[in-house]
């Protein structure tokens, strides 16, 4: 899926996943990231499978670590913070992100696990 197609798919998902009063800001945030594969993959994963099963919107993306084409990213939303691991090919939800401390150890564990046969 090219960037434009992915953006259109995300906009459609947003119509169902974001409260009406938050939709304009969510669309503007998506527009700022429209040329970034990593961000679009996180948006698509988030809006496809809302972690708390309630309407929400991503307000901030923060890069915590990167290694060999993989990125550990915190997504701050209206209601919570979540961790994702993302590449140009896709993104995976890792769970809620309460504190930044300990993420380096988490990242090392993820990378080590990914390298195992």
Image (tube, helix red, strand yellow):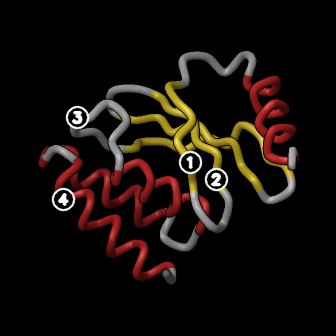
Which secondary structure, mark 1? Answer: strand
Question: Which circle's residue, 4 or 2, is located before the other in the chain?
Answer: 4
Left or right of 24 on screen, residue 113? right
Residues at marks 4 and 2, CA–CA distance in whole angstroms = 23 Å
Residue displayed at 40% across by 72% down: 7
According to the picture, the residue beneath numbered tag 1 turns out to be 92
Residues at marks 3 and 1, CA–CA distance in whole angstroms = 19 Å
According to the picture, the residue beneath numbered tag 3 turns out to be 54
Residues at marks 3 and 4, CA–CA distance in whole angstroms = 13 Å
Residues at marks 1 and 2, CA–CA distance in whole angstroms = 6 Å
According to the picture, the residue beneath numbered tag 4 turns out to be 15
Q: Are marks 1 and 2 in contact (CB under 8 Å)?
A: yes
Q: Residues within 10 Å of mark 1 (few under 14, many from 20)?
A: some
Left or right of 72 on screen, residue 6? left
Question: Which of pointers 4 and 1 indicates the residue nearer the eye?
Answer: 1
Q: Which mark is residue 86?
A: 2
Which secondary structure, mark 4? Answer: helix
The x, y position of residue 36, in whole percent, is: 59, 67
The x, y position of residue 33, in whole percent, is: 51, 63
Q: Residues within 10 Å of mark 2 (few under 14, many from 20)?
A: many
Q: Residues within 10 Å of mark 4 (few under 14, many from 20)?
A: few
The x, y position of residue 94, in whole percent, is: 57, 35
Residue displayed at 34% across by 54% down: 48
Which secondary structure, mark 3? Answer: loop
Residues at marks 4 and 1, CA–CA distance in whole angstroms = 22 Å
């Amino acid at each position: 899926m090219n960037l434009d197609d992915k953006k259109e798919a995300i906009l459609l998902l947003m119509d169902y996943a974001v409260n009406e009063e938050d939709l304009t800001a969510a669309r503007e945030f998506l527009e700022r990231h429209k040329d970034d594969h990593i961000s679009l993959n996180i948006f698509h994963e988030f809006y496809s499978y809302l972690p708390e099963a309630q309407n929400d919107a991503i307000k901030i993306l923060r890069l915590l670590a990167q290694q060999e084409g993989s990125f550990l990213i915190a997504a701050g939303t209206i209601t919570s913070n979540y961790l994702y691991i993302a590449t140009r090919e896709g993104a995976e939800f890792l769970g809620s992100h309460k504190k930044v401390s300990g993420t380096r150890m988490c990242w090392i564990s993820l990378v080590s696990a990914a390298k195992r046969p």
